Image: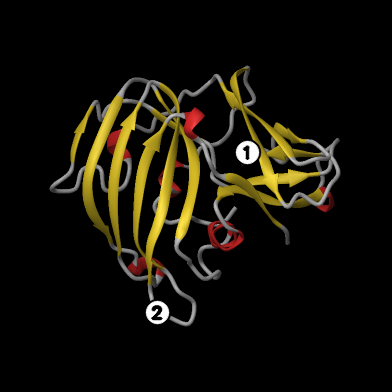
């Protein structure tokens, strides 16, 4: 998976544990055929964490084992001047915003069909899967995070992205997180005028799982 600015510290290895709950959804413009979803893993064989039906219906299993050394206070921007928050010591576990799609059965690289992300357009999806070389566009995308207890962060910060040869990003945060699984819905609100535009501003807002209104988007190789 490619490095994704801002959400990079949230990306966690998916556990092959019992599942706490399931998130249902739909792949926009699914070409047909059944498939499986897989996530990042430390071993050679990534775990299967969901399925896609022939009609494009997604069933994603959310891990019950969410042990993580990462806390809300470790995330970018959270401790910047002007930010306010509560329970910054709350543990944070996240699914990668980019999930792999493969043909059913034993894993092999030649069975990988592409990747899926939660996004409102194909253009946002392609940027999210390859932010270093794909042009950024305005629009929304989402990822899933689990927190150990109720917590919150609000405010604005500026992220220096010069180490990636990208312009700085102004980020407005409004995380009001419930204990358990939450959505982080981000909206890219500004892009640079470069030949390959980069994100210059975005908002990130926490929401309950039942408020998901984005489709899964398939990005093929």
Relative side of 197 to 220, left or right: left
Relative side of 176 to 181, left or right: left
Residue at horizontal 31 percent and vertical 47 percent from the top: 76
Q: Secondary structure at mark 2?
A: loop
Relative side of 80 to 30, left or right: left
Residue at horizontal 29 percent and vertical 27 percent from the top: 151
Residue at horizontal 78 percent and vertical 44 percent from the top: 102
Q: Quadrant of the C terminus?
A: bottom right
The reply to whether residue 18 is in sight is yes
Q: Secondary structure at mark 1?
A: loop
Q: Is residue 57 above or below residue 1?
A: above
Relative side of 82 to 36, left or right: left
- Crowdedness near tag 2: few (<14), some (14–19) or many (≥20) residues, C-alpha within 10 Å: few
Mark closer to the observer (2, 1): 2
Q: Which residue is mark 2?
A: 193
- Crowdedness near tag 1: few (<14), some (14–19) or many (≥20) residues, C-alpha within 10 Å: some
Q: Is residue 59 above or below residue 154?
A: above
Taking the view exactly as shown, the residue that stands out farthest to the bottom is 195
Q: Which residue is mark 1?
A: 41
| Whole-percent x, y for residue 191 in the image | 39, 69
- Label 2 to label 1, Cα distance in Å? 36 Å
């Amino acid at each position: 998976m490619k490095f994704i600015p801002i959400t990079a510290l949230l990306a966690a290895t998916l556990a092959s544990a019992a599942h706490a709950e399931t998130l249902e959804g739909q792949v926009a413009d699914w070409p047909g055929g059944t498939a499986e979803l897989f996530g990042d893993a430390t071993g050679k064989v990534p775990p299967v964490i969901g399925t896609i039906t022939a009609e494009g219906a997604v069933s994603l299993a959310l891990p019950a084992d969410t042990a993580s050394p990462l806390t809300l206070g470790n995330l970018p921007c959270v401790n910047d001047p002007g930010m306010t928050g509560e329970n910054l010591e709350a543990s944070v576990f996240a699914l990668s915003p980019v999930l792999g799609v493969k043909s059913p059965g034993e894993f092999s690289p030649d069975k990988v069909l592409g990747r899926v992300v939660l996004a409102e357009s194909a253009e946002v999806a392609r940027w999210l899967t390859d932010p270093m070389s794909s042009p950024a566009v305005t629009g929304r995308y989402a990822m899933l995070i689990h927190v150990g207890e109720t917590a919150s962060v609000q405010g604005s910060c500026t992220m220096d992205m010069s180490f990636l040869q990208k312009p700085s990003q102004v980020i407005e945060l409004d995380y009001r997180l419930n204990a358990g699984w939450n959505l982080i819905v981000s909206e890219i609100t500004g892009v640079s005028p470069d030949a390959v535009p980069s994100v210059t501003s975005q908002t990130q807002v926490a929401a309950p799982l039942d408020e998901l209104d984005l489709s899964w988007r398939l990005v093929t190789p």
